[in-house]
Image (cartoon, rainbow, N blue to C red):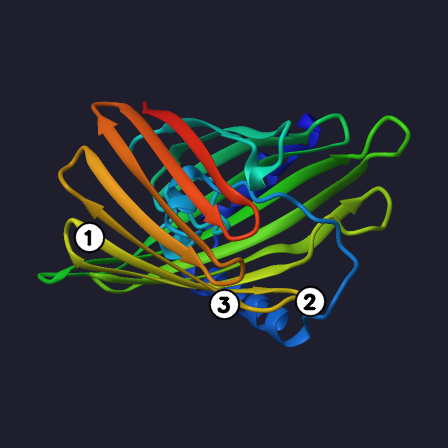
Amino acid sequence: MFSKIIFLYVSLRNFADVSIGRLVFVVLIAFSAFCCCASAVCAQSVPRTDSPRSLGLGESPIADPSDTWSENAAFRFDTSAHVRTMLAPFPGGLPDSWTAGVAGDAPVDTNLTLGATFTRYASSNIFSWESIAAQVSKTFPVARSTSGERDAVVGVRVRYGDESFGAEYLPLDEMTVDLGAEFDLLPQVTAAAAVTHLLTLYNNQGIPMEAMDGWFGFSYRPLPEASIDAALELPEGAHAAVHGGIEYAFDAQLFIRVGTNTSTGEFSGGFGVVTGSFLADFSAVRNPQEGTSVAFAIGFNL
């Protein structure tokens, strides 16, 4: 597994030399092909592994990803490195189940960011799922003016997943590719498009672990301390879903979030705290059928 990730990093390093026009073109063409050609497939069910911030915002910040757990691999350049760990006990209201993970990102060159995640979900001794991923994203300046700066970001991620159904069954292993892009339409408005599970590089049984999932997203900042996120999810072989969320910063240290997911009827909320280099997030998601589940995360700016 780790040799594949090393190979991934070496291969993706050439990403920095590709022009913005070609990268955005590739993402949009891939997304258009997905929307036109999507059809129902026999895929396994993979647990959601969004960060507490994303869950608190109803999984809506596709155009404003703040960590490498996001469905959008286009992670905006930051001069600081970050490391985060999360825990979600009893996700979906299931007893004896949990989700945990570690994520990190770091700048490695001018406007180039590398990231990695490891996530594991387990339900009693019956089922377990884990994923290790590596990604690279490039931020490009689009315009500089007195009204503000506008950038575009393109990202590529490779994920290796493993599903286990107990000792009696052969594990299902799969390696897939995700693509994502975001771009500032205005200084206060960002749009994004992303596709997860766009390509399958390896599968040991010929059974897809998950179906392709397409996303369109927008993020609007009417005030410096407030943001409104909206996303349209187009999962292959399933109904479309609308996600929405609002984040408000009382100051530079405390953030409050609310969100909703129309596909599940969920309502969510949460908060984030930033103190120096320390980060903390909490979310609670209310599902009409499954009850309330919570998630926690802590992290550091390095």
Residue at the image point whose x is 54% and y is 55% from the top:
179
CB under 8 Å between callouts 1 and 2? no
In the displayed orientation, state which residue is furthest to the right: 168
Q: CA distance from mark 2 to mark 3?
A: 25 Å
Front residue of 153/265: it is 265
Q: Is residue 241 above or below residue 37?
A: above
- Label 1 secondary element: strand
**Image location (x, y in percent) of residue 144:** 18, 59
Residue type at numbered disc 3: Phe
Residue 15 percent location from the top left of the image: 51, 47
Q: Which residue type does callout 1 highlight?
A: Ala
Distance of label 1 from label 3 (alpha carbons) = 31 Å
Q: Is residue 232 left or right of residue 258?
A: right
Identify the residue at image location x=20%, y=35%.
254
Which one is closest to the eye, mark 2 or mark 3? 2
User: Label 3 neighbourhood size at 10 Å, few (<14), some (14-19), many (20+)?
Assistant: few
Q: Secondary structure at mark 3?
A: helix
Judging by the rendered image, the residue that carries numbered circle 2 is: 237
45 vs 280: above or below: below
Please tell me which residue lies in front, 30 or 122. Answer: 122
On residue 25, the disc is 3
Q: Residue 136: x percent and y percent?
A: 49, 42
Horizontal side of 125 relative to 147 (left or right) equals right
Q: Which residue is mark 1?
A: 226
Q: Is 39 positioned to the left or the right of 193 in the image?
A: right
Question: Which callout, 1 or 3, points to the residue nearer the camera?
Answer: 1
Q: Which mark identifies residue 297?
A: none
